[in-house]
Amino acid sequence: MGKIGETTLQIDLTALEHNYTYLRSKIAPKTKFLAVVKAFAYGSDMVSIAQKMEQLGVDYLAVAYVKEGVLLRDAGIKTPILVLHPLPSNFDEIIDRCLEPSLYSRKILSEFLQVAKSKNQKDYPVHIKFNTGLNRLGFNETDVDFVSEKLKGNKAVKVASVFSHLAASEDLDEKSFSLNQINAFKRISDGLTQKLGYAPMRHMLNTSGILNYPEAQFEMVRSGIGLYGYGNDANIDAQLRPVASLKTIISQIHHIGENETVGYNRAYTSESARTTATLPLGHADGIGRQYGNGKASVLIHGKKAPIIGNVCMDMIMVDVTGIDCQEGDEALVFGSGNSAEDFAAGAKTISYEILTAISQRVKREVIAG
Ligand SMILES: *Cc1c(COP(=O)(O)O)cnc(C)c1O
């Protein structure tokens, strides 16, 4: 990867392909694969990730909100796109842009049916979401009759899939809860299939689900974090490659004496003479204040440089004492060599949060490989 001139999120499409191949190797060849590209493809670059996944022949893409799907259609993406969390104000646009809604409540289902009918649709693909224990979005098992009554004989829409979501797929201490969810989903999807008189696709596994419950892959799986190189497990992480690497360059180096302070509110006090480096990224770029005061470290020439003091809006200061470095040298905030999972763990959060936090101010550089 070439030299950077400013804070840059490098997006490695070769790593994406590697991760896709790895995840595919964990499921049956006939199982379909949905790539989750919501939130700018987990903070990276939604269009280039979706284009690469389309090239690799992925069966479905998923976004959270309608406007994310519209961005993909504007970029020429042709792959079916599931919208996980549509709102009624977007239903016209969903149909106009060939996006496929997740329908998760009585109100949403009824309103979508009306819009589809008023727009003279026939067999418009929809996806029915059931809640099996996450208690977030979805019909409950007791709604199966309502859903099938509403849909049976309705010519405007056709159920492309029925799906659910595990609450703790990465946590094997919750295995019996997950198995209960899987069983409930089987009952629900069997019931719905029987009542509809045709068999929609079924899917319930996210990345950790694919790895921990392969027996529940049904007709399709949905992966996000795994494609981006993280698997909620150190052994899996070792098999995957981070797609996004956040890099920056040292703006200035300071040599400070004992008992000096660094940054706003004088949050850091030196116990001895230190060398510090100021880096051009801060909480406006997505490095939140929770990473300050030693909670996270960047890598400079392969060595850990902890963030000292409070994170500023546009800058952080790191301790580079004993690291042979100069102004203009590169610092790796996270990515290949400084895992986003480790960076996040220092501040008691998860890779998902730090990845999706990187703001649109940060330059994206896509590396095709
Ligand atoms: C975000 C999301 C996923 C992807 O989960 P990962 O853990 O990133 O693989 C799958 N399904 C649903 C419903 C989601 O909201």
Image (cartoon, rainbow, N blue to C red):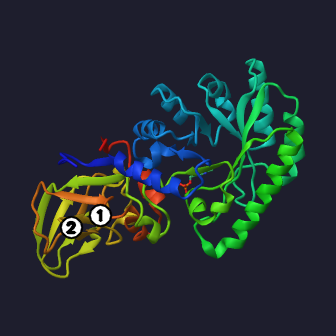
From the viewer's perspective, tell me whether residue 221 is left or right of residue 304. right
Q: Quadrant of residue 51?
A: top left
Amino acid type of the residue that numbered disc 2 sits on in the rendered structure: Gly
Q: Residue at x 17, y 65 (%)?
A: 301
Using the image, determine if residue 76 lies above or below residue 322: above
Q: Which residue is mark 1?
A: 337
Mark 2 in CB contact with mark 1 (< 8 angstroms) = yes
Residue 125 at x, y = what percent? 70, 32
Q: Is residue 140 visible?
A: no
* Disc on the earlier residue, 2 or 1: 2
Q: Which residue is the site of mark 2?
A: 302
On-image quarter of the C terminus: top left
Instruction: Judge whether 361 appears above or below 119 on screen.
Output: below
Tell me which corner region of the image, top left, top right, bottom left or bottom right, holds residue 178.
Answer: bottom right
Q: Is residue 357 above or below residue 309?
A: above
| Mark count | 2
Local secondary structure at mark 1? loop
- Extreme residue toward the front, this view: 29
**Residue displayed at 32% across by 71% down:** 293
Q: Dot 1, how many residues are within 10 Å of its Cα: few (below 14), some (14-19), or many (20+)?
A: few
Q: Are there few (<14), some (14-19), or many (20+) residues within 10 Å of tag 2?
A: few
Provide residue 78's location: percent of width, then percent of height. Answer: 53, 29
Q: Tag 2's secondary structure?
A: loop
Vertically, is 102 above or below 158? below
Report whether the residue tagged 1 is closer than 8 Å to ligand 1: no
